[in-house]
Image: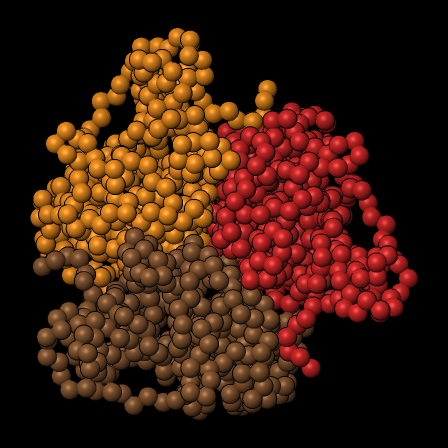
Chain colours: A brown, B red, C orange
Amino acid sequence: MSKTDPGNYFEDFRPGQVLKHATPRTITTGDVALYNALYGTRFALFSSDEFARNCLDGRTLVDPLLTFHMVFGKSVPDISLNAVANLGYAEGRFMAPVAPGDTITASSEVIGLKENSNRKTGVVYVRTTGTNQHSEPVLSYVRWVMVRKRDEAAVVGEAVTPDLAGAVAAKDLVLPMGLRMNTRVYDFAVSGAPHAFEDYEVGEKIDHVDGMAIEEAEHAMATRLYQNTAKVHFNQYERAKDPSGRRLVYGGVVISTAKALSFNGLQNAGLILAINGGRHVNPYFAGATVFAWSEVLDKADLGPCGALRLRLVATKDRPCADFPDKDAAGAYPPEVILDFDYWAAVPKRG
Amino acid sequence: MSKTDPGNYFEDFRPGQVLKHATPRTITTGDVALYNALYGTRFALFSSDEFARNCLDGRTLVDPLLTFHMVFGKSVPDISLNAVANLGYAEGRFMAPVAPGDTITASSEVIGLKENSNRKTGVVYVRTTGTNQHSEPVLSYVRWVMVRKRDEAAVVGEAVTPDLAGAVAAKDLVLPMGLRMNTRVYDFAVSGAPHAFEDYEVGEKIDHVDGMAIEEAEHAMATRLYQNTAKVHFNQYERAKDPSGRRLVYGGVVISTAKALSFNGLQNAGLILAINGGRHVNPYFAGATVFAWSEVLDKADLGPCGALRLRLVATKDRPCADFPDKDAAGAYPPEVILDFDYWAAVPKRG
Amino acid sequence: MSKTDPGNYFEDFRPGQVLKHATPRTITTGDVALYNALYGTRFALFSSDEFARNCLDGRTLVDPLLTFHMVFGKSVPDISLNAVANLGYAEGRFMAPVAPGDTITASSEVIGLKENSNRKTGVVYVRTTGTNQHSEPVLSYVRWVMVRKRDEAAVVGEAVTPDLAGAVAAKDLVLPMGLRMNTRVYDFAVSGAPHAFEDYEVGEKIDHVDGMAIEEAEHAMATRLYQNTAKVHFNQYERAKDPSGRRLVYGGVVISTAKALSFNGLQNAGLILAINGGRHVNPYFAGATVFAWSEVLDKADLGPCGALRLRLVATKDRPCADFPDKDAAGAYPPEVILDFDYWAAVPKRG
């Protein structure tokens, strides 16, 4: 038996199969410092323990995207080591907050399989769950990836395609225990802006103005921090043979960079509650400057706080004052690299 | 009301105005690890909890420059987002030590305003204060920046220029509570050198010999860690239009790099007590190797320890064996990038 | 007396001399996060506090290589600042585990001196010991370096050459207190692979498949984190005069990168117990992709766990499917950069 892990190929997956991923990971303030250094995020909830404790009944928490990247990274060796492309996300819900000291384990259930007509590849749908040391789920999401077959001739089962929600319903959003964000506990004077739930309107678009270049060393450090092993991010020797000649940047780095940029306009919407969907619509290589804009898609009053459903669009080397977007046929300009749909908690003025 | 922060322009400032800056920041051992990785600093007080506890009656602390960068970073969005140049610092005093777990907030008071004769820009003087979670000031300093006017035609008030001290007086230096540095508590055998307060003479110059190159990824990570948002450090797309074509390195990165280099010769003078002044006399871009030399400007016996007033001069791609300096007219050679004047605590032999 | 440390030259060393190295260092979870981000290591023992506590009777620990780099770094200013080459390691034993919060001090004893026939340089052998805050040794190893003479005419003493073991004997391996790794406490389901002590055979070779490129910023950050001051890693201005024109990467970065790659095949052999030997057989410069393969040299049943003696060979820009190795005459292909011999603990199936 070879001791080297070749990863799974399309024909290795079975509907209902559960894969327990390797390497549990204790999240620390060291990881948080690196997250800050790599993206420059400024949301007060994750920057200040004092600020967090006011809103969370004495608790602190890390940026849910850090948890997402850690869980995603663990799933890579089993799910997407032989992937051609990461196609999308859906039904992502953060179910319990993660604080420094918590240890995260991840597993995935295969919920769909569909061979492509070329018979060289197929699409694998998995529901991945991150769990803390108390066996509580902290995050669950679906992603689908195009995976190579080991043997083109292999005969595979009937196509199974999961029925996925277009967005997480507001009633299914889970607030971190004890979370309350209103004028009594949320300090708008230091959060970066006075804008509350009441100030955002559905259809509103916000250009986040700022731009951020990412270096090879930066995306590689981020991706290694998450113990994501996808070869395309690290193996330059192999990548030199690709037409780009470059290492591909992990899409999560673009998500976190764009989310950090969104502070300028969404200063109080740092806390992601759900990931409704997301697509990396064009590749991003190190060196280009990332810009971003957001659109308010929906609003919901959750009681202890409000929630905004937001669309976050990121570009490379193209400022977003004119909100670059897909055309009527759904085609994106080449500078658009990310179209990400999520719910975020926001403080209420009341 | 736009939700994107455009920053303040010269005509937005008023004498006496107080700006409470966004994003309180909890300092952690993760930040300290990054500080070490980015500058390679070796001063024992900040490297070893055991060493610190011996000198600080059981307490530990982080490098005051880390605190400085954090406080400075917070002030950028309100003070210098539309700055043309950061002109200088004065009257900087560290008033209480910061340890991992402390949360820092920052605010600035406008203490001077002077429109330039071209009426396109003006100089804004602010006194910026960093405060910990107990509302104790940890740092106060003055800086002045040249800021653009939004509207050249705007009529502004009378010039107000603050009366700034050339240096912090020795009697105004604040020692961290419990600090004592003498042969009974200060372990010269592991601090890196036997040199004590008594061994330094006013006028003495020290070449720090070593050189340190800084990469784009390194200065960008440092500057993001401090949540400093100045576009010149990050937005490569915009910077490509500048004659340099390069991102400008945050001046604080040069200060910390030069301070770390100064270990070789000032091994026991790591603890900065005050910043008397500082100027970034030429721009620094990534890739060049930083060298540094120091001059002892003054000495003061503070009782529990000594203090040296030091001038730290940094260069790029020029070793400092011949102490490159400004000429009689005050003009600096193009390789000199920093002229920084500070007080540091040093152990006494007694 | 000059305050700048010129480092020691060959004629400054005496047999039996003990050098107490500067700058004790408290290891933190911040250092661990950087170690993860710089190498992408995935061994469960160092990634998950929960996993470690199961195997270590409630304790956690950091990767022994992090301790090695910290101790090595401290020895550089006194031992190898004027070194021409780092020639080898032997008799390395980890004697007590290091956990976040521990403070490490280092000292070296000169155990051998041998002038080279050209009289310009000589070989210095030192036994370096790292000690924790309880004065317990945590690591001891021998290394030998070629060091320049300050004055070629200086007359030096008789050659003294230490008698070094080819490998640490299995009976001399020290297990971390409380360590037990068997199916009752070691969770093979999340460690990354089911392979136990019983599954490895002497002579077995494993290609670790994956490749990892290292950027200038990455090796420089790692090396600064360890407070290693060797000029060749940092001073680009000086290095530009070298035929390579490049900064040399600290050999320890290659060791840690190769060790992290070895997870793919040696998932349960993360815990290094001893370093039998190691040579950096060709220089490595940033940008090249590191690959690695391993060979099982020996096995030993230690009671609470097994141990494998492993040879870890690393290459640059050359995949290792054909196990590139030295030839019969002992000459290495130019792509081989490391030949490292160590003992690692592995879980037993029993």
Image quarter of residue A26: bottom left
Image quarter of residue B328: top right
Number of dots carrying numbers: 0
Quadrant housing the C terminus of chain C: bottom left
Q: Indicate the position of residue A112 as horizontal and vertical percent values.
A: 23, 83
Location of residue A236 with respect to C133 vertically, above or below: below
Q: Indicate the position of residue A236 as horizontal and vertical percent values.
A: 33, 54
Kindly identify the residue that appears in the image at 30 percent across and 78 percent down: A144
In the visual, does A213 lie left or right of C350?
Answer: right
Residue C64 in view: no
Location of residue C52 with respect to A73 vertically, above or below: above
Image quarter of residue C243: top left
Kindly identify the residue that appears in the image at 74 percent across and 50 percent down: B87
Quadrant housing the N terminus of chain C: top right
Location of residue C92 with respect to B97 vertically, above or below: above
Q: Nearer the viewer, residue B253 or B267?
A: B253
Q: Indicate the position of residue B208 as horizontal and vertical percent values.
A: 58, 31
Kindly identify the residue that appears in the image at 49 percent across and 68 percent down: A316
Q: Nearer the viewer, residue B77 or A45?
A: B77
In the visual, does A157 lie left or right of C248?
Answer: left
Residue A161 in view: yes
Q: Indicate the position of residue B82 as horizontal and vertical percent values.
A: 70, 63
Give the residue at the far right of this rendering: B158
Q: Nearer the viewer, residue B13 or C99?
A: B13
Kindly identify the residue that appears in the image at 14 percent across and 34 percent down: C327
Q: Nearer the viewer, residue B96 or A253?
A: A253
